[in-house]
Image (cartoon, grey):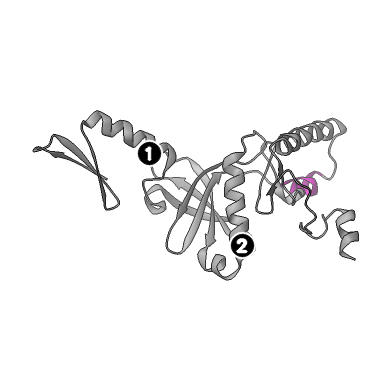
């Protein structure tokens, strides 16, 4: 991105990835760029982040611990190989749905999506980094959770589900592994992995979810 003072016309040129745009003053150019920054990523993933280490892996993605080159804040970078998206339309649809839903929802118990980058080979989702374990591993470690903490957890879970349903969003894959704890207490958490989520005001009867967590009424419909 380059500024150029065009003397003959007293205009300022902004070169943005090969395209030229003109503004009459430098101040108006700055205002325009600030507006763009809030809506578009003007740099590349390689310019903005460095990958530190792998912290997770799923059927269609790898999650890395990433660090901003500008602020040094750490994030979780979910890396999806585009070749998989071309081979399986379900992967593509799930990724698009996850991006749409996470940009739409704003709740303290839902993981936050900050940016999405696309390269020739990968799509990167830049998510907030959650260093604590999921609920499944928390239970394995502690064996027993107190009644008070379970009550607080249930209240927080019902609160975030009520918020999602008020926005007509159903997660459809809520399980222990998709609930990431956010502190040493046993009731603060964030829900992750919205790839199977659905946005609709209409009843859906599609069979989906993870084995071992699918509701009995769904299983009965399978038989």
For residue 72, which quarter of the picture?
A: top left
Circle 1 Cα neighbour tier, 10 Å, few/some/many (<14 / 14–19 / ≥20): few
Query: How far across and down, in percent of the image, does residue 170 sit?
Result: 73, 45
- Outermost residue on the bottom side: it is 87
Pick the quarter of the image with the N terminus. Answer: top left
Res. 130 mark: none
27 left or right of 118 in image: left
78 left or right of 38 in image: right
Residue at point 46%, 52% (across, down)? 117
Query: How many numbered marks appear?
Result: 2
State the residue position of label 2.
91
| Foreground pick, 218 / 179 | 218
State the residue position of label 1.
36
**Residue 223 part of the magenta-drawn span:** no
Query: How far across and down, in percent of the image, does residue 107 sit?
Result: 64, 34
Query: How far across and down, in percent of the image, does residue 38 sit?
Result: 43, 37
Pick the quarter of the image with the C terminus. Answer: bottom right
Q: Which residues are magenta?
A: 134-142
């Amino acid at each position: 991105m380059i500024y150029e003072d065009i003397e003959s016309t007293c205009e300022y040129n902004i070169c943005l990835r090969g395209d030229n745009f003109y503004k009459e003053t430098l101040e108006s150019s700055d205002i325009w760029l600030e507006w763009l920054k809030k809506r578009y990523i003007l740099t590349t993933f390689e310019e903005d982040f460095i990958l530190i280490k792998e912290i997770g892996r799923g059927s269609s993605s790898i999650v890395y611990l990433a660090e901003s080159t500008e602020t040094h804040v750490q994030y979780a970078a979910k890396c999806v190989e585009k070749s998989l998206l071309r081979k399986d339309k379900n992967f593509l649809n799930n990724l698009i749905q996850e991006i749409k839903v996470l940009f739409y929802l704003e709740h303290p118990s839902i993981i936050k999506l900050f940016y999405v980058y696309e390269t020739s080979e990968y799509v990167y989702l830049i998510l907030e980094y959650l260093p604590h374990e999921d609920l499944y591993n928390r239970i394995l470690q502690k064996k027993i959770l107190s009644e008070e903490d379970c009550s607080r957890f249930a209240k927080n879970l019902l609160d975030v589900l009520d918020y999602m349903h008020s926005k007509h969003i159903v997660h459809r894959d809520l399980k222990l592994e998709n609930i990431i704890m956010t502190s040493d207490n046993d009731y603060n958490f964030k829900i992750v992995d919205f790839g199977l989520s659905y946005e609709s005001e209409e009843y859906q009867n599609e069979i989906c979810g993870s084995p071992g967590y699918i509701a009995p009424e769904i299983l009965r419909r399978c038989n």
